[in-house]
Image (tube, rainbow, N blue to C red):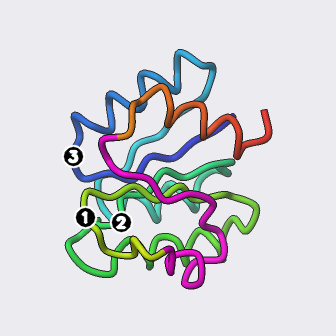
Amino acid sequence: MSVLIVEEQAALAEVWKGHLERMGSTVSVATNVEDAGRHLEQKPFKVIILDLMLGRGHAALAVADLAQYRQPEARVIFVTNTSFFSDGSIFRHCSNACAFVPSHTRPDDLAAMVQHYAGT
């Protein structure tokens, strides 16, 4: 299964990537909106792990919208280190959102969620 991680903190993205690869996933990493857009145009993804605070603005929502347009079957797991959208409203704003978890979620738990939402 193919997974895209969109996370500005490269070290955190690499930790997640390592866990996902050990579980058999093919993982691409983007550290900004432009990289994410290029990845979404180049190959299909089953799941996208997307930092809600990407670009310190509404960049994550733009990436989610682009994913919905380019790859409507891809599911988005939002991760965040803030309480923004903690009321669950992210699910009203992004129809491809399937989960909303803290950035400090254990990497093996995140990998299990990816497998679940990818249908494997």
Crowding at mark 2 (Cα within 10 Å: few <14, some 14-19, many 20+): many
Q: Mark 3 points at which residue?
A: 9
Tell me whether circle 2 and circle 3 mark residues in contact (CB < 8 Å).
no
Q: In which quarter of the image is residue 68?
A: bottom right
Tell me whether circle 1 and circle 2 mark residues in contact (CB < 8 Å).
yes
| Mark drawn on residue 52 | 2
Q: Give the residue at x 38% y 39%.
A: 105
Give whichever of discs 2 and 3 has the lower sequence position. 3
Tell me whether circle 1 and circle 3 mark residues in contact (CB < 8 Å).
no
Q: Nearer the viewer, residue 91 or 58?
A: 91
Question: Given this view, does label 2 or label 3 mark the residue nearer the observer?
Answer: 2
Q: Which of 8 and 39 is in front in this view?
A: 8
Q: In this view, does 86 lie to the left or right of 120?
A: left
**Residues in magenta, as a range:** 88-104
Crowding at mark 1 (Cα within 10 Å: few <14, some 14-19, many 20+): few
The amino acid pointed to by label 1 is Thr
| Mark drawn on residue 82 | 1
Q: What is the residue that sits farthest to the top in this orientation?
A: 22
Q: Would you say residue 94 sits in the magenta stretch?
A: yes
Q: Give the residue at x 39% y 75%.
A: 85
Q: In which quarter of the image is residue 98?
A: bottom right
In what quadrant of the picture does the C terminus appear? top right
- Whole-Å distance between the Cαs marked 2 and 3? 12 Å
Crowding at mark 3 (Cα within 10 Å: few <14, some 14-19, many 20+): few
- Whole-Å distance between the Cαs marked 1 and 3? 15 Å
Q: What is the residue that sits farthest to the front in this orientation?
A: 87
